[in-house]
Image: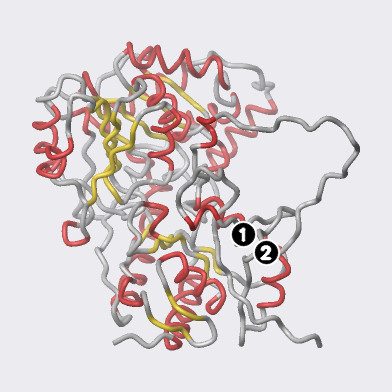
Amino acid sequence: MATMQHTRLHRFSSPCSSSDSSPAVASKLWIRGRSVPSGVKITSSSSRWSSRITAVLSQKEPVAQENGAVELDTSLSPRVAALRPSKTMAISDQATALVQAGVPIVRLAAGEPDFDTPEVIAEAGRKAIQEGFTRYTPNAGTMELRSAIVHKLQEENGLTYKTDEILVSNGAKQCITQAVLSVCSPGDEVIIPAPYWVSYPEMARLADAKPVVVQTSLTDDFLLTPDALSAVLTEKSRLLILCSPSNPTGSVYSQQMLDAIAKIVAKHPRLLVLSDEIYEHIIYSPAKHTSFAALPGMWERTLTVNGFSKAFAMTGWRLGYLAAPKRFVTACNKVQSQLTSGASSISQKAGVAAMGLGFAGGEAVAKMVEAFQERRDFMVRRLKSLKGVKLSVPQGAFYLFPDFSAYYGSEAQGFGTILDSESLCKFFLEKAQVALVPGDAFGEPRCVRISYAASMESLKTAMDSIEQSLTLINIE
């Protein structure tokens, strides 16, 4: 057998522009037939999977042949060049490629439920196809689905909207992007509490707005405090993005905290709020979800985004919605009409079925939430038993965001120095065969994101491997 190369993984990032100032992004690691830049190496001294990991992550990109033709200008728009690729998607793709190559990676990187879509929803999709409901729908969505959303928001969230104040899109991500594009002008500031979902800052940049990141702390459960918000608001502040329950921390804002934030928002006539409520049903007692638009005086300035992906295990159906005052919905609808047009007719029929499951998704969603809570409790116990790890217990969603910074600067046997969250995640991928996401992707480099949307068996395997691999690192 050939001797295995003792080299090291250096970058998780997928391709991006050279204008990105982050060294972690500039030194790119590509997969699935794309090139690995010179200097990127892969290490393994003990794992029997290292040679296969090396092979999968070291595939070369085909080189164009010289034909004497005039060189084509392949430059990109500065707006696009300024965007950074999603690190969660890059790592998920890498983990998938490794699994397809036969490496037993436990994938805890993607934010996707491991459950199948509830059968009644899937059947509605099949029926739509069988009955020929496969044509374009109105750009804003079918009246049937928008009416169901209006009913849901009134019954569950205490929010009153008309059907022309609802816009159905191809996923909540499209809703957020269109909202930012519609309300932000060049030079406007978008206030983003960190840790944040990876796409928020890039959406602001796409709109030529400036993301203003506000750091939070683990001791405050990674929640934005009123004082921290007040400190960054200026006359350029246009949009505050709140996500509760939060990706990546699982933190949930109480109504009392949201009331305090609303009082500050009310003092700024230009300031709007985008409330990302995609995880609202995945919440653990005694925590309760509060819609920001339901607070006094906030309906007029709040754009509420929700969808079907997380609570109903419908990530592949690509269906989300925006609820907001008509002026904002009309603007977003106009953007959507020139981008994608309406969402899939089949998915919209499935969405109607999802809305018909009952309050908060009924028994089908309740069973999934019960399983998520059991997994959360298991993971919290295991993580708290690890030396040097700090943790805020999540109250919703299906993520943990532990602080592993006690391991930074330490030497790992057969690996090298653990420099930061990215190198720690490379260490876990190589030595534990577990895929996690570095915290710097979410604006908090001391942490890593762990998704527990996986079977209990997979979680036990992952934690056993992580615990064993940490014995290779000696911390004081």
Comparing 403 with 380, the one in front is 403
Is 196 above or below relative to 461?
above
Residue located at (50% from left, 74% from top): 427
Tell me whether the residue at label 2 lies in contact with that at label 1, contact meaning CB atoms closer than 8 angstroms. Answer: yes
Image position of 143 with respect to 157: above or below: above
Q: Nearer the viewer, residue 98 or 461?
A: 98
Percent x, y of residue 14: 58, 52
Q: Determine which quarter of the picture holds residue 249.
A: bottom left
x, y (%) of residue 468? Answer: 46, 85
Mark 2 surroundings within 10 Å by alpha-carbon count, few (fewer than 14), some (14 through 19), many (20 or more): many
Q: Secondary structure at mark 1?
A: helix
| The label number, if any, that marks residue 158 in the structure image | none
Mark pair 2, 1: CA separation: 8 Å
Extreme residue toward the right, this view = 67
The residue carrying pointer 1 sits among few (fewer than 14), some (14 to 19) or many (20 or more) residues within 10 Å by Cα, namely many
* Residue drawn where x is 83% and y is 45% of the image: 64
**Does label 2 or label 1 sit earlier along the sequence?**
2
**Amino acid under label 2?**
Leu
In-front residue for pair 252/288: 252
User: Residue 57, which numbered label?
Assistant: 2
The residue beneath circle 1 is: 94
Q: Amino acid at mark 1?
A: Gln
Image position, residue 278 (x, y; %): 37, 40
Report the residue at 46% width, 81% height from top. Answer: 464
Dot in front, 2 or 1: 2
Where disc 2 sits, the SS reads: helix
Could you say which quadrant of the image residue 149 lies in? top left
Above or below, comparing residue 52 to residue 369 in the picture? below
